[in-house]
Image (cartoon, rainbow, N blue to C red):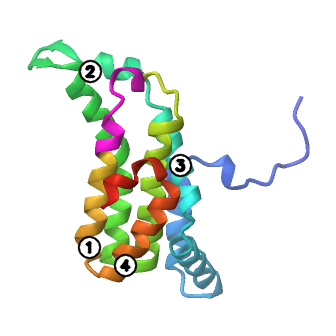
Amino acid sequence: MSSNKRHTPNVNDVRPHEQTAVLTTLAQRTDAVGEAVREEIERLLTNVDPESVAREVQLDFELIDADTIFARSGRHRYGYTAPEEAAWQVLEETLEPYLERMKWYHAAGRDEAFDAYALGVLRGLYDVHHDSEAEWKQHWPDNVREMFGWVLEAWEEHRQGAAERQVMQDQLATSCPRWKRDLT
C-alpha cells in the first residue's frame, strides 16, 4: 500500500558524497544562500573547541580494532609485517587527518584555531593513554604517548614565540598533568 503523502527529503536522506556535492554547490552561489553557507563554514572552522576535538580524537582511537592490527601483521606476499609495525600503521592513519587539519589551520594563518585544535588533539591523545580501555592498548600501551610528542613537535615547529609556547605549556600542564615533565 502506498502513501499519498510525499516525504520532503532532508540532508540525512542523501549519502555523504551527495551531501558534499550539495554543500559545494551552495557555497559557490553568489547570492545570500551562498554567503550564508560560506559564513557557516567560516564559523565552524574558526570556533575550535579543544574539548570537542579531544573527544573526537579519543573516540577515533577507541574505535581501532585490535583484530584489524593483527590482520595486517604476519606473512603476506610482499614479506612480513610485525604486529608492532602494523599497530604503528593503523595508529598513524588514525592520527593523520588531525595533523592535516593542523597544517591547514597554520597554512591559512588561523593561529588561534591552530593552537586550540592542537591542544584538543594533544588532550585527546592524553585521554586515550590514561582513560581508554581499548584492546589494542594492552599490546602497545606507549604508542599514544609517543604520538603526543609528535603532535607537540608539529605545533612547536609553527609556533616559535615564547609567549605562545608558554600559553600552550600552561594549558597542557592543566589538561595533561601526568605528562607535565614531558612538556619542559
Q: What residue span does the magenta drawing correspond to?
A: 136-146
Query: Hey, which residue is sitting farthest left in the picture?
Result: 79
Compute the Cα span from label 2 to label 4. 40 Å
Q: Which residue is mark 1?
A: 158
Q: Which residue is mark 4?
A: 164
Compute the Cα span from label 3 to label 1. 23 Å
Q: Which residue is mark 3?
A: 56
Q: Which residue is depicted at the point 37% across and 42% down? A: 94
Q: Are marks 4 and 3 in contact (CB under 8 Å)?
A: no
Residue 34 x/y as whole percent: 58, 81
Task: Examine the structure image and report whether residue 142 is included in the region drawn in magenta.
Answer: yes
Q: Which circle's residue, 4 or 3, is located before the other in the chain?
A: 3
Compute the Cα span from label 1 to label 2. 34 Å
Name the residue type under label 1. His
Q: Are marks 1 and 2 in contact (CB under 8 Å)?
A: no
Label 4's element? helix
- Majority secondary structure of magenta residues: helix
Task: Examine the structure image and report whether residue 174 is included in the region drawn in magenta.
Answer: no
Compute the Cα span from label 4 to label 3. 24 Å
Name the residue type under label 3. Glu
Label 2's element? helix
Q: Nearer the viewer, mark 4 or mark 1?
A: 4
Q: Which residue is depicted at the point 58% across and 81% down? A: 39
Q: Which residue is mark 2?
A: 72
Q: Nearer the viewer, mark 2 or mark 4?
A: 4
Q: Are marks 4 and 1 in contact (CB under 8 Å)?
A: no
Q: Which circle's residue, 3 or 1, is located before the other in the chain?
A: 3
